[in-house]
Amino acid sequence: MPILEVNNIETYYGGIQALKGISVYVNKGEIVTLIGSNGAGKSTTLKSISGLAKVKTGSILFKGKETMNKPVHETCLLGMAHVPEGRKIFSTLTVKENLLMGAFSVNNKQLIEERMEIVFGHFPILKKRLEQKGGTMSGGEQQMLAIGRALMMEPELLMLDEPSMGLAPIIVEQIFDIIKKLNQNGITILLVEQNAYQALNIAHRGYVIRNGEIVLSGKGSELIENIEIRDAYLA
Amino acid sequence: MLLEMLQSLPQVLIDGLALGAVYAVVALGYTMVYGILQLINFAHGEIFMTGAFIGTTFFILLMGMGWVSSVPQIFVLILVLIVTACLTGLLGMGIERVAYRPLRNAPRLIPLITAIGISFILQDVIRFIAELSSGNYIVTGPSLFTDQMTISFSSLSSIFNDASFKTSFLIVLVTAFILMISLDYFINRTKWGTAMRAVALDRETASLMSINVNKTISITFFIGSALGGATGVLFAVQYGTIDPFIGFILGMKAFIAAVLGGIGNIRGAMLGGILLGLLEMFASANLTLLTGGIFGAEYKDVFAFSILILVLIFKPEGLLGKPTAEKV
Ligand SMILES: Nc1ncnc2c1ncn2[C@@H]1O[C@H](COP(=O)(O)OP(=O)(O)OP(=O)(O)O)[C@@H](O)[C@H]1O
Ligand SMILES: [Mg+2]
């Protein structure tokens, strides 16, 4: 059974229709990527799932339960974490405070400590910067902090919106390695990327989105070979 | 001239600190709400005034029950402070819920005008109730903490005069500082305080951390209004007589203190309030002297505000504020 099932959702910003019937599913344990050019509707899809954007019609099932248009702070408690586009680190909060905010719903100090150690395992740099203000970290470090902060929720589904954005190739590689590793540790991943080839390389399956519609879908390796992807993506 | 200014300095410092502490705590309410909603909550001065009335009402009631004479005054004060803070906290929270939340996504000017409207409503409601119950909207509470105290600065150095004040001054000063220190601790060291700062920075992302944004905003209003109301009680204790319009000028000054310190910045509001209080008292004591008698003490506000304007010309973001360009 899929952990996430998005059925034919339509999302509007005022009068503008951003999603024109998107259907996506993610199985437990998969890495699924959503690729497409600027303004295609990738971020809007993630926002619709987490509840940041109001969905007009359709349905969203997470672990079999309808979650469409629930308040964001409630959907996040169900086991999904959304790392937004542009990282959105709390700039004047310290690294530690940023991480603690990720665990906002947890009251057990011991548990918070344990999760923090797990995050440090993935991102040792964060441990050295605990007292630094989030906004003063480099772009790559901020992305690591954003992912680390989401991991503090111990999510079953991790949704990442363009984690490679604006990062040097070597850092991008590092981030993708971590995503793979997180997936091997049992976290299901929904990855939004413009970096199509790299994303498809680590993904089990992918969807290509254009103008608010899914125009292609399939196995990662197949999509790479599919010439249409180049059209869809570069168009 | 310098000598005379030095002589009065101890008194200026003590009066200024007490007044400044009052400004500072009220300024916190403005700055917290601004920080989280970018709203200048003009009704905050009226919350302060409402607190003064609620507190005075309790004092009068308790006095009628014989409490004020039989129980140590400090316990009565603490009780009244707590009850009033809770009530004004709820009032502020309620105002946010019914008047500001529906306008959360409206253009900024709309909630601002609503806030001004709320402050008129509060003024008139309190005036109505006060007139109805006592026939006069100017109310005088029991005199508390009236013992005179003197600190002998002259024994420190013969330059200084002694400073003398009522015990109530000390009470105001100490309570206000306890409130400020507790708030600072809450904001910087607790989970909900951190959540408040997170919501102020980025509401959407805060909600992704499973922070209930509406609840956080409610808590902000509760705390800001509780502090404002408690300060109203302190004001009533210090001055004895209150009316429904005391919130206007004091609120204005506290707001300006918040701007001076850098609106949205908690420690800035404290600094701004204390500075404003000190400046005002300094002007009040020395203006005649400084201007050779042309301007009297009644021009203290002009003096204090001229200095504020100067500060803001050179540092428009306020003393502890971040330049807007740096804002992410
Ligand atoms: N807050 C908003 N208000 C109005 N329109 C919006 C808003 N956010 C997005 N849109 C519009 O919705 C469409 C989809 O935007 P979305 O951000 O989902 O694209 P995207 O695929 O994530 O693009 P990018 O790769 O540039 O991040 C675009 O046409 C965009 O202009
Ligand atoms: Mg996007």
Image: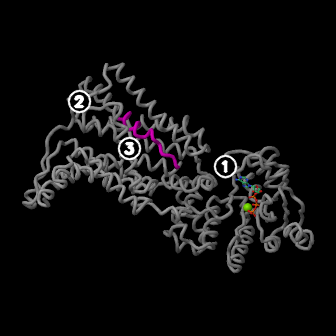
Q: Earlier in the sequence, mark 3 or mark 2?
A: 2
Q: Amino acid at mark 3?
A: Met
x, y percent for residue A140: 63, 73
x, y percent for residue B299: 25, 46
Question: Mark 1 to mark 2: distance in Å?
Answer: 51 Å
Q: Which mark is residue A72?
A: 1
Q: Which chain does tag 2 point to?
A: B
Residue at 82 percent of width and 49 percent of height: A9
Question: Mark 3 to mark 2: distance in Å?
Answer: 27 Å
Q: Amino acid at mark 1?
A: Val
Quarter that holds the C terminus of chain B = bottom right
Question: Can residue A32 be seen from the camera position used here?
Answer: no
Nearer to us of marks 3 and 2 is 3
Q: Which chain does tag 1 point to?
A: A
Q: Amino acid at mark 2?
A: Pro
Secondary structure beneath label 1 = helix
* Beta carbon of the mark 3 residue lies under 8 A of ligand 1: no
A76 or B152, nearer to the observer? B152
Question: Mark 1 to mark 3: distance in Å?
Answer: 37 Å
In magenta, the rendered stretch is B38-51
Which image quadrant for residue A120?
bottom right
- Disc 3 and disc 2 in contact, CB within 8 angstroms: no
Which image quadrant for residue B161?
bottom left
Secondary structure beneath label 2 = loop
Q: Is residue B82 left or right of residue A137?
A: left
Q: Is residue B110 left or right of residue B266?
A: right
The answer to if B68 sits in the magenta stretch is no
| Residue assigned mark 3 | B252
Nearer to us of marks 1 and 2 is 2
| Residue assigned mark 2 | B142
Residue at the extreme front: B294
